[in-house]
Image (cartoon, rainbow, N blue to C red):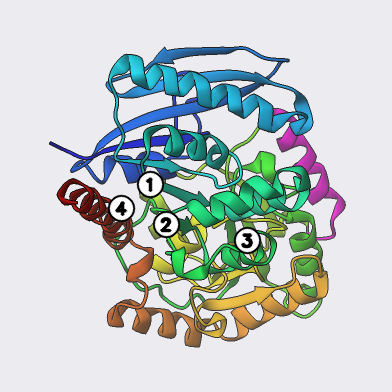
Amino acid sequence: MKPTIVHLSCDYPDPLRGNKTSAIFDLVGGTPEYRHVVYSLNRVNAFSGISSIPFGEDRIAVVYGALPKGIFWGRSLRGVSRWICEDMKKRGIKPDLVEAHKFTVEGLVGQDLSHEFSCPLVCDIQGDTDISILTKKISLRNRYRKIAKEVSLVFPYAPWNVGPFNRLVGLQPNKCQNLPVIPGINKLSSAPVIEEDRLLTVFRLDSWKRKNIIRVIQAIEKLSIHRKNLFLDIYGGGSAKTLMALNNIIKNSRLGDRVKLCGIVKSDHLAELMKKYAAFVLPSLRESYGIVYAESLISGVPVLYSKEWGIDGYFDEKSIGYACDPSSVVDIAKGIEFLLKHQKELKSKIATMQEEGSLNILRKDSILDVYRSGLQKILTTREKIEMGRNNA
């Protein structure tokens, strides 16, 4: 019989919100040796209330009411815990392990389920959201300390996620195993050197403020004084309101057609598209992981990313690009200049890393192996403990 893992996720695509990220969906789909029961959580602004709808075998979409801005949030999630406990009992679900896919949100529910069903708890850390909540929700800090003490394994999306949790709630680094997000591109390939100073960025346009596009444009304005053929192509889709706002920002710059909105690019065309550029730039103000950084490196293209955000900590920065201070136009410009000046060297280093296997940690098979081995270690430990109890 397959071990049963109950997943708690606000980020699993469901009939209520089908446009959620595929990060958790891909982990679940990539490990069919387990029975995965998914509770996909959706919050709406309301004083209380819980409703649900199944959307496949072992898939339940849950919507719960909670006050805005996290008011009485802990109490609201206690109600979600009780509802899921009762639903699991009605369905005859006995978990071998509970996984909460954000430490500070689903982790509160996961801890309750772990206690109720006497099974191990695994948590993910999604840096942007989790660290923001951990910092702001001082009233829940004691709960988070207990979770940090009780959790069997933590999957941070990136190395820099661990430090704040260690400082604020005592999470031990030896409980943590870095788990990158599965990329849409998996085949390693090198990229040619491009003669033009042509840059690209890819993101959901509605997130343009967080993606820091204004400072990128300002940095390009500074560099364009001596780099006369410097271009930036922006790929991604968004709302009509966003499109209008970005067009106005571009028009008000001194760059003219050097910055273009190029529309949505299909994932199966992304690798070949990236190879037409000198570098990829995305100095986000906040970024939990940034899957497109990984996809750029897998495609052989160097990246400009933000210090202590995104993929920072996985590699030596000067081997893959430049880690900038995202609040500094000067440093963003310095990073772009570095990428352009050292394009040939950086693309050669990335190609070598691909050949030597250094970039394999970003690929689907490796990520699933890390995930699988982590879960299996916890399940095996639990099995040995239960055998010991039965033999006592």
As shown in the figure, which amino acid type bears the numbered disc 4?
Leu
- x and y percent of residue 145 in the render? 62, 53
- Of the two numbered discs 2 and 4 on the same chain, state the one appearing first in sequence: 2
Q: Are marks 4 and 3 in contact (CB under 8 Å)?
A: no
Q: Residue at x 78, y 68 (%)?
A: 219
Q: Is residue 224 above or below residue 23?
A: below
Q: Which residue is mark 3?
A: 165
Q: Position of residue 170 (x, y in %)?
A: 61, 63
- Tell me how far mark 1 sits from mark 3, CA to CA: 20 Å
Left or right of residue 148: residue 384 = left
Look at 61% across and 45% down and name the residue there. 104
Residue marked by disc 2: 153
Find residue 197 and report its image quarter: bottom right
- In 3D space, how far apart are the residues under numbered discs 4 and 3 (Cα atoms)? 21 Å
Q: Earlier in the sequence, mark 1 or mark 4?
A: 1
Q: Which residue is denoted by mark 1 in the rendering?
A: 120
The secondary element bearing badge 4 is classed as: helix
Q: Is residue 158 left or right of residue 382?
A: right
**Type of amino acid under label 2:** Leu
Distance CA(mark 2)–CA(mark 4): 8 Å
Assess disc 3: are there few (<14), some (14-19) or many (≥20) residues with their C-alpha within 10 Å of its C-alpha: many
| 1 and 2 marks in contact (CB < 8 Å) | yes
Mark closer to the chain start, 3 or 2: 2
At mark 3, the secondary structure is: helix
In this view, the residue in front, 350 or 76, is 76
Task: Find the residue positioned furthest to the left.
Answer: 1
Q: Which residues are magenta?
A: 240-255
Q: Element type at marker 2?
A: strand
Determine contact: label 1, label 4, CB under 8 Å: no
Q: Nearer the viewer, mark 1 or mark 2?
A: 1
| Mark 1 or 3: the one toward you | 1
